[in-house]
C-alpha cells in the first residue's frame, strides 16, 4: 500500500486453518531450515548485527507536549512479553499530554541472529485479545527533523473501547512495507531471509538488526478521530527523531 492509500475492513488477524498433513510437513521443513540457518549465521558477512544493544533509557521523557508519566509494565508481565516476542531488549513508555491524551509506546530491538526465528504481527497479536481492526491504512509522516516515516495506522475497536495504533518495523535503515509484513508472516520467511543474505550485496555499514516502534492511544469519544490521529502521529514523529539519536544505525534519513 502506498503512503496515503486507505482501506476500511474488518480484520480478524487469523489465517485460515491449514490441513493437518500440510502443517506437519511445513513444521518439519521449517525446523530443518531454522537449524541450518542458525548454523549458517557463523559464516562471515551473513549476519550484520550492530553488536551492542541500544540503550533505550536515553530516549527523553519529554517530547514536545508529551511527558513520560513514569508508568511502566510490571516486571512479571514484561517478562511474559519478552518470552513471547523473544526480543533482546525493549522499553515501554507511557506518555501523557496536557490536553489529556495518554499513549503507550514500545521500543523493541532484536539482533540479526534472532530475526530469522519469527515475526509477531501487531494485527495478529491484537486480534487474540479481542481487538477488531476497523481501519487499515498507511500514513507517511514527516518528523520535526525532516525524516519520512511510513506509519502503519490502525483504528481498533474492542467492546466499545476504541484506540488508535501506529507502528513501523525496520531492518537496519530499511523501513518495511506492507509486502514485507505479509512475507514475514508466512512460514517461508526463513527461506527468504537466508536467500537474501546469501545473494544480496550490501554496503559495509548496512546492518540488519530489527527495530519495531509501536504506539497505542485510547480514543476520546467526544473528539474527532482525525484530530486525535494527528496528535498521535505528532508523538510518533518526535519519538522517531529521538530514537535515531540512540540508534544511528537505523536512521533512514
Image (tube, rainbow, N blue to C red):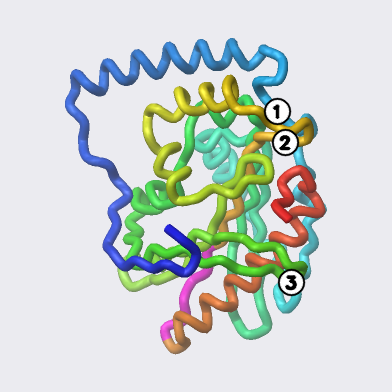
In this view, the residue in front, 197 or 224, is 197
Q: Secondary structure at mark 3?
A: loop
Q: Please determine whether, in this image, residue 21 is positioned above or below residue 127.
A: above
Q: Residue 123 lies in magenta, yes or no?
A: no
Tag 3 or tag 1, which sits nearer the N-term?
Answer: 1
How many residues crowd mark 1 within 10 Å: few (<14), some (14–19), many (20+)? many
- Residue span colored magenta: 216-221
Q: Please determine whether, in this image, residue 88 is positioned above or below residue 106.
A: above
Mark 2 and mark 3 residues within 8 Å of each other at the beta carbon = no
> Mark 2 sits on what residue?
206
Q: Residue, x 60% and y 81% (percent of image)?
A: 100
> Mark 3 sits on what residue?
144
Q: Please determine whether, in this image, residue 108 is positioned above or below residue 163.
A: above
**Quick one: quadrant of the C terminus?**
bottom right
Q: Please determine whether, in this image, residue 196 is positioned above or below residue 227.
A: above
CA distance separating discs 1 and 2: 7 Å
**Quick one: quadrant of the N terminus?**
bottom left
Q: Residue, x 56% and y 54% (percent of image)?
A: 168
Q: Nearer the viewer, mark 1 or mark 2?
A: 2
Q: Quadrant of residue 199?
A: top right
Mark 1 and mark 2 residues within 8 Å of each other at the beta carbon = yes
Tag 3 or tag 2, which sits nearer the N-term?
Answer: 3
Residue 88 seen in the current view: yes
Q: Residue, x 57% and y 38% (percent of image)?
A: 82
In this view, the residue in front, 240 or 160, is 240
How many residues crowd mark 3 within 10 Å: few (<14), some (14–19), many (20+)? few
CA distance separating discs 1 and 3: 30 Å
Residue 48 — which label? 1
Q: Position of residue 239 (x, y in %)?
A: 70, 62
Amino acid at each position: 500500500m502506498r503512503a496515503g492509500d486507505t482501506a476500511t475492513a474488518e480484520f480478524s488477524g487469523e489465517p485460515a486453518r491449514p490441513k493437518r498433513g500440510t502443517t506437519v510437513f511445513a513444521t518439519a521443513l521449517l525446523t530443518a531450515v531454522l537449524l541450518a540457518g542458525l548454523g549458517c549465521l557463523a559464516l562471515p558477512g551473513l549476519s550484520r548485527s550492530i553488536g551492542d544493544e541500544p540503550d533505550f533509557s536515553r530516549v527523553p521523557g519529554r517530547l514536545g507536549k508529551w511527558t513520560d508519566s513514569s508508568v511502566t509494565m510490571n516486571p512479571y508481565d514484561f517478562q511474559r512479553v519478552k518470552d513471547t516476542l523473544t526480543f533482546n531488549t525493549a522499553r515501554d513508555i507511557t506518555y501523557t499530554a496536557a490536553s489529556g491524551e495518554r499513549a503507550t509506546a514500545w521500543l523493541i530491538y532484536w539482533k540479526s541472529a534472532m530475526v530469522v526465528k519469527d515475526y509477531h504481527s501487531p494485527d495478529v497479536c491484537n486480534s487474540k485479545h479481542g481487538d477488531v481492526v476497523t481501519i487499515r491504512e498507511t500514513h507517511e509522516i514527516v518528523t520535526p527533523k525532516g525524516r519520512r516515516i511510513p506509519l502503519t495506522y490502525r483504528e481498533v475497536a474492542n467492546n466499545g473501547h476504541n484506540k488508535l495504533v501506529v507502528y513501523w518495523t525496520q531492518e537496519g535503515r530499511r523501513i518495511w512495507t506492507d509486502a514485507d509484513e505479509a512475507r514475514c508472516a508466512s512460514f517461508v520467511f526463513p527461506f527468504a531471509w537466508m536467500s537474501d543474505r546469501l545473494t544480496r550485496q550490501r554496503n559495509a555499514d548496512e546492518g540488519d538488526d530489527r527495530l519495531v516502534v509501536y504506539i497505542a492511544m485510547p480514543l476520546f469519544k467526544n473528539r474527532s478521530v482525525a484530530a486525535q490521529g494527528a496528535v498521535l502521529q505528532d508523538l510518533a514523529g518526535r519519538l522517531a527523531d529521538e530514537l535515531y539519536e540512540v540508534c544511528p544505525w537505523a536512521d533512514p534519513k
